[in-house]
Amino acid sequence: MYPIELKGISKVYHPGQRWARTALHDIHLCIAEGEACALMGASGSGKTTLLKIIGQILAPTSGECRIHGVNTAALSERKKARIRNQTIGFIFQDFGLVEDRNALENTAMPFLFDPEISYAQGKKMALEALEQVGLARLAKERVSHLSGGERQRVAIARAMAKRHDILLADEPTGQLDTETALHIMQLLQAIQKSGTTLLVATHNPLVAAHCTRQIVLKDGAVTSDENSNQSSR
């Protein structure tokens, strides 16, 4: 059983309208436990749409998305929300932060919806994640006062804090300098090596080089799927 299994996934925006647009077409992918995959392709190739379908934020127009063997199309919105909170960490390209909250509150936010971990314990885990990304000193700073790179690192810390089974990252190093980007990729690699399944959407070949598998999308279809470390699969 794979943590992520996609069978014939297609996504059409505005179906039946003149301006309908096919974002994904007949995607078939299996991603193994603990695998590190780079999802590559030009802007508009379908990378973000695919991540959002895997992350249970978007529903596919057709096909099956299975998370740990469960066909999520059959689930209620409440059960999908539980998968998002318990199983999948997501680093959003637009950060998805709450502007009037500080960095620690943003990082700890997923613990507000977790009945198994107290919020006090969650804040400790969130502070550890902020330390890992080099932002512990700004834990009490409102995110509206932070730079773009600092905000990106808060978003990364939030996704890391709960140590999910699956971590999805949409251009996680896009606003970071080279040194910080390298540090973040080393952190993500360390998380992946502990057993987390990692899928990173990126334009950056240096980021992709940190992954053992490179999947290329073009016009919503997979055009290449290469494993640079066959022994890892």
Image (spheres, helix red, strand yellow):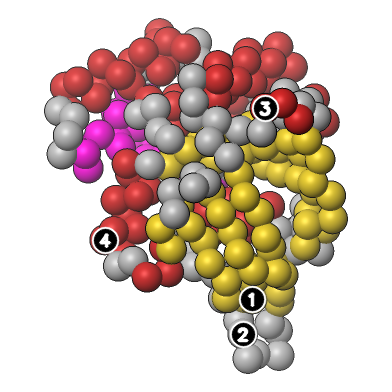
| Image quadrant assignment for residue 14 | bottom right
Which circle, 4 or 3, is nearer the viewer? 3
| Image quadrant assignment for residue 120 | top left
The residue indicated by pointer 4 is 78
The residue indicated by pointer 2 is 15
At label 4, the amino acid type is: Arg
Q: Relative to 77, is 96 on the left or the right?
A: right
| Image quadrant assignment for residue 124 | top left
Specify few, some or many for label 1: CA neighbours under 10 Å numbering under 14, 14-19, or 20 or more.
Answer: some
Pick whichever of labels 1 and 4 is earlier in the sequence. Answer: 1
At label 3, the amino acid type is: Ser
Q: Assign a secondary structure to mark 4.
A: helix
Q: Nearer the viewer, residue 169 or 25?
A: 25
Q: Quadrant of the C terminus?
A: top right
Pick whichever of labels 3 and 2 is earlier in the sequence. Answer: 2
Magenta part of the chain: 94-114
Pick whichever of labels 2 and 4 is earlier in the sequence. Answer: 2
Q: Assign a secondary structure to mark 3.
A: helix
Q: Is residue 202 above or below residue 191?
A: below
Pick whichever of labels 4 and 3 is earlier in the sequence. Answer: 4
Residue 145 image offset from top left, x and y in percent: 45, 26
Q: Which mark is residue 232?
A: 3
Instruction: Report how far apart the C-alphas of labels 2 and 4 lie in the structure.
Output: 25 Å
Q: Nearer the viewer, residue 40 or 119?
A: 40
Whether tag 1 and tag 4 are in contact, CB under 8 A, the answer is: no
